[in-house]
Image: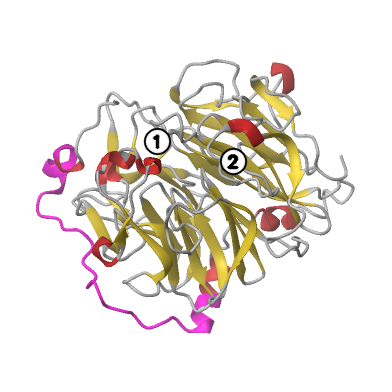
Amino acid sequence: MPFTLPVSVALAAACDGQDRETVPRFYYPPDATEEAEAAIEAAVPSDASIDAVLDATADAEAEAPRVVRALATGSATHPDPLVGGGDHTCVIAGAARAVYCWGANDYGQIGNGKTGLATPAEDVATATKIAVDETGLPFDGAEELALSAWHSCARRGDVLFCWGQRLTGAQAEPPGPNADRTAPRAIGNFDVKRIAAGGPHTCALKSNGKMACFGHSAHNELGRANADDAPCTAPFFYDYNGSATHQCAGTLVEVMFGALAGSTSLAAGETHSCALAGAKVHCWGSATQGKLGRPLAQATELNAQLVVTDPTTLAALDGVSAIANDGARHTCALRSASGTAGAVFCWGPNEIGQLGADPLATPVRAFAAAVPGITGATGLGVADGVSCAVRADATVACWGTDLAALGDGGIASTAVPTPVKGPGGAGLLTSVVAVAPGVRHACALRKDGTVWCWGKNDRGQLGDGTKVDSAYPVKVVGLPLE
């Protein structure tokens, strides 16, 4: 087990007398007016959708086919080898905006109508189109993706679709030993405009500005008291996050703290959740190892805690344009504020250097701090133990754990942002607009619409038609207009 200091020990001296965010548990603030929300969104655009990045460069890149419009990776580790570790990637591609996936399919998360039943028997090594949804209708027109290790979600208009593992209720249905969902299922009764899938839970920003979550709830990551949900036990939860007891919510649960004015996007971690609202970051759920970015938070928080940059003054992290987590225990934010535009701030556990700091000197950090050496970044991606950023020159740098996931050809972990090399190790991977790391592999979307992946490939997660590991990027095959 990696050594980490309790947040209360690491920060008690610096934070004596300070308090956690104390929004009353059942207080529902009034919704922001449409004019205020529009003003915030205009001032601080969200880059969680790759469409915004591609549209901004459409004129300059008019000659290049817009093959891929969004990219997401779901990946995790688990102490029980019978459960498996996820490792799959999906994209929205082609004129019809279809969803293509590749990699691990142990719980039906590829969406091709098959499941490995917790084995690698149905893994796929090339990009595979999800042809139809659960009702047999064509599945296209997707606008947003959100992947966890064992389930996948996509948004089409204001409708959320999910597929894959069902045990935890992560698809808004009663938890239990149900068969995997191997095709997208529409989740009705609410309209959504942003989505996030983390550990075994999912969150959505509703059209009315409020948030609703469902799935695993043992650490208040759904924004409501765990006691409100029924216990759920199964081998899947083998010592999950060090907890012997688990609850699951199979229904849509609005967070107890109500709407956050100006909310634009969400991020779901392993056992915590975050929202970007008014250019600031708010997190709730498990506060262990500094996950909520606020010193002296309770062990689990029902109320959204404002992420800070100073453990003494509790100055808020502001000017944020994007957040990333994707099932990890740490979180990172991309700042767009004047003077720090393109800086990346991270918080949480740092046992492998995923915060961009020496893990021996800083094993955990309960406040946000800038990653040294990253300026002018235009995008970021996070998985457990690793962080990546798209730099101003359209190259990629990653830091944290390796297993070749850093794309530098080595096997050593590092806290120093390391450039991802080009195919075969020649030069650097260039013309990148988005990056999506997993625990054991990573993928990047280039301006020409192609996708390149590197790292472990035992589950076909590199999408190149083989199961051969690669320390350097290889091109994903099977996408349209190759």
x, y (%) of residue 202?
47, 58
x, y (%) of residue 331?
41, 46
Residue 376 visible to the viewer? no
x, y (%) of residue 5?
20, 33
- Magenta span covers which residues? 9-38
Q: Nearer the viewer, residue 253 or 375?
A: 253
Badge 2 vs badge 1, beta-carbon distance below 8 Å: no
x, y (%) of residue 372?
43, 33
Mark 2 residue element: strand
Residue at 66% in and 22% down? 472
Q: Residues within 10 Å of mark 1 (few under 14, many from 20)?
A: many
For the residue marked with disc 2, what is the amino acid?
Answer: Ala
Q: What residue sits right under mark 1 in the picture?
A: 355
Quadrant in which the C terminus appears: top right
Residue at 69% in and 29% down? 429
Q: Nearer the viewer, residue 292 or 98?
A: 98
The quadrant where residue 47 appears: bottom right
Q: Nearer the viewer, residue 304 or 256?
A: 256
